[in-house]
Image: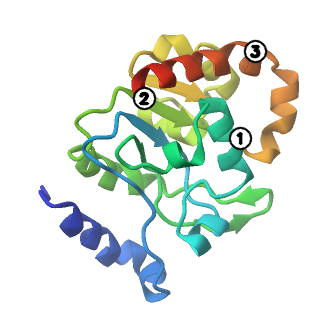
Amino acid sequence: MKTDLNDLTQAIIQDPANRTYTQRSVKPLFSVDPQAEILIVGQAPGIKAEKTQKMWNDASGQRLRQWMGVSSAQFYCATKIAILPLDFYYPGRGKSGDLPPRMDFAAKWHPQLWDFLPNIKLTLLVGSYAQRFYLQQPSSTKLTLTVKHYQKYLPKYFTLVHPSPLNYGWLKKNPWFEEQVVPDLQRRIKMILK
């Protein structure tokens, strides 16, 4: 078990599975701090995040911050909010959007990084990939039901639909999300960050 975050980061960089990224000088994108009390688990950084080395640096991130009721300064303050994507590297483009994260990646690295997150009070599971991994759900599980019944997973996890523009149709079909779920999320985050 790694006891130093720098050593662990180097191990991620040197992992042969990440060789193509390392050869292009792409660094793994994640943020952990022992003081953080909120953790965001999403799928994987997008191409803009990879290029700017800043996670959630797009329209999805703007919407996620709105849902959480936090400013950019709060969101990117590592001592308040940690960010652990299921994969720390952009997986590439598929037919209808970004490719899914490598699921074996989270299984390998998340448990070790949790050692650096002793104070997490709430983990946001953003999107179906994060929910399947952390809630150990089969791929047939319907995201809408998981998000609608988010209270079932509290107080440890808060389940959210991904804030991608690709999901705007879902948001229109499910107005209860922004009417009921988002205000509860904001209330809980405000209580933790006060």
Q: Is 52 positioned to the left or the right of 78 in the image?
A: right
**At which x and y percent is residue 69?**
61, 31
- At x 27%, y 46%, the residue is 111
Q: Is residue 7 left or right of residue 38?
A: left
- On screen, residue 144 above or below 110: above
Dividing the picture into quadrants, the one containing residue 27 is bottom left
Displayed quadrant of residue 194: top left
Q: Which mark is residue 179?
A: 3
Q: Could you tell which of marks 3 and 1 lies nearer the N-terminus?
A: 1
The crowd level at tag 1 (other Cα within 10 Å; few <14, some 14-19, many 20+) is: some
Q: Which residue is mark 2?
A: 193
Amino acid on which disc 3 is placed: Glu
Residue 119 x/y as whole percent: 26, 33
Q: Position of residue 171 (x, y in %)?
A: 81, 29
Could you say which is closer to the camera, residue 123 or residue 57? 57
Establish if 190 lies above or below 64: above
| Quadrant in the rendering for residue 37 | top left
Count of marks overlaid on the render: 3
Q: Amino acid at mark 1?
A: Arg
Mark 3: which secondary structure?
A: helix
Q: What residue did someone put label 1 on?
A: 63
| Residue closer to the observer: 68 or 168 | 68
Foreground mark, 3 or 2, reads: 2
Question: Can residue 136 be spotted in the picture?
Answer: no
- Dot 2 crowding, Cα within 10 Å, few <14, some 14–19, many 20+: few
Q: Nearer the viewer, residue 53 or 91?
A: 53
